[in-house]
């Protein structure tokens, strides 16, 4: 627990320091790095299951999918011009992976190779790139950065609240076959933490968030995102359990790998983008 707390504080310190000095660029660098590391660990899990994905192909697509929309908009006036970039990259990944599988895999694992490679790209960078799209949703990247941070804080502090509430009050298992330590009491604590934090940030920093995100609306949105984050976390746990591993890696003391850090954000990112698109 102590190492988890220290790691969490250090991670937030690095994020905030990076944003202070480099602004939205730092957010994109960190997101691109964490997305690539998450995909790298996801592919390691699929290899543990016996599959052979094209790791470097997937990682290349991941970097482009996460960072390219942001930097291309620095040279063009309308971000909407690149709305179809991620789906196009996904389609290109399917074509290249299929051709590579025909030449580098035998009949026994070609389909599995294509499926594992494309599932990784779709599940990790395609979903997480909606955080990039959220930053680009507003007039300037700086304006979009705060809603993006709000979403990340709401999702990640749901994890913290769930952990603490589960330790203090956890009695009823939520999904014992997937994640034995998760409880309904912990989930309720995580949701309450997200709602309180989301509403508080909207109350104290209204000038930095969209006008439509009043404290009441923020509480409702935070609740939706918290439920989504819990579901996203459970899917990652299911993947790790299928690979017979407790953590996806050992990159971050007390937390695990990059996948253990981004797990609650993967499903949350597209849901949050759609919500803020509606609110904007």
Image (cartoon, helix red, strand yellow):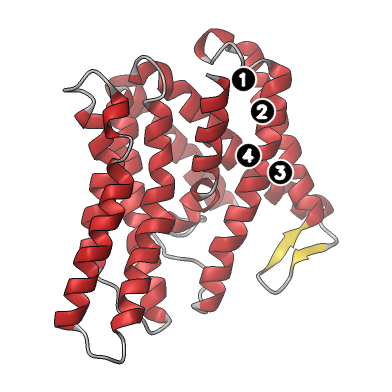
Q: Which residue is mark 3?
A: 190
Residue occupying the point 52% across, 69% down:
239
Q: Residues within 10 Å of mark 4 (few under 14, many from 20)?
A: many
Q: Label 2, secondary structure: give it.
A: helix
Q: Earlier in the sequence, mark 4 or mark 2?
A: 2
Upstream in the sequence, badge 3 or badge 4? Answer: 3
**Circle 4/circle 2 CB separation < 8 Å:** no
Instruction: Kindly report the distance in space between the C-alpha atoms of the residues bearing marks 2 and 3.
Output: 11 Å
Does residue 246 show up? no
Q: Kindly indicate whether the residue at mark 2 contacts the one at mark 1 (C-beta within 8 angstroms).
A: yes
Q: Nearer the viewer, mark 1 or mark 4?
A: 4
Disc nearest the viewer among 4 and 2: 4
The residue tagged with tag 3: helix, strand or loop? helix
In percent of width and height, residue 29 lies at: 28, 37
Q: Is residue 268 above or below residue 210?
A: below
Tags 1 and 4 touching, CB below 8 Å: no
Report whether residue 165 is seen: yes
Tag 1: Cα neighbours inside 10 Å, few (<14), some, or many (≥20)? some
Mark toward the start of the polypeptide (1 vs 3): 3
Q: Quadrant of residue 57?
A: bottom left
Which residue is labeled 4 in the image?
225
- The answer to which quarter of the image holds residue 140 is top left
Q: What x and y, as percent, mark residue 69?
A: 27, 35
The label on residue 197 is 2
C-alpha separation, residue under disc 4 versus residue under disc 2: 12 Å
């Amino acid at each position: 627990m102590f190492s988890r707390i220290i790691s969490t504080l250090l991670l937030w310190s690095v994020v905030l320091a990076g944003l202070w000095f480099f602004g939205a660029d730092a957010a994109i660098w960190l997101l691109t790095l964490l997305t690539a590391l998450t995909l790298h660990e996801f592919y390691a899990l699929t290899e543990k299951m016996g599959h052979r994905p094209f790791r470097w192909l997937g990682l290349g697509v991941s970097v482009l999918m996460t960072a390219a929309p942001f930097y291309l908009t620095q040279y063009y006036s309308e971000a909407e011009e690149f709305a179809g970039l991620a789906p196009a990259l996904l389609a290109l990944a399917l074509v290249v992976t299929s051709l590579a599988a025909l030449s580098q895999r035998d009949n026994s694992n070609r389909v599995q190779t294509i499926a594992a490679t494309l599932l990784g790209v779709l599940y990790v960078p395609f979903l997480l790139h909606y955080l990039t799209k959220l930053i680009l949703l507003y007039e300037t990247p700086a304006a979009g950065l705060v809603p993006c941070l709000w979403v990340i804080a709401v999702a990640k502090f749901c994890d913290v609240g769930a952990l603490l509430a589960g330790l203090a009050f956890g009695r009823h298992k939520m999904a014992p076959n997937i994640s034995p330590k998760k409880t309904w009491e912990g989930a309720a604590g995580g949701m309450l933490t997200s709602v309180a934090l989301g509403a508080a940030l909207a109350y104290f920093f209204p000038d930095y968030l969209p006008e439509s995100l009043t404290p009441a609306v923020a509480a409702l949105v935070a609740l939706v995102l918290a439920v989504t984050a819990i579901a996203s976390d459970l899917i990652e746990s299911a993947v790790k359990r299928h690979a017979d591993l407790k953590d996806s890696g050992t990159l971050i003391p007390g937390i695990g790998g990059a996948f253990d850090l981004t797990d609650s954000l993967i499903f949350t990112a597209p849901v949050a983008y759609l919500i803020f698109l509606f609110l904007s």
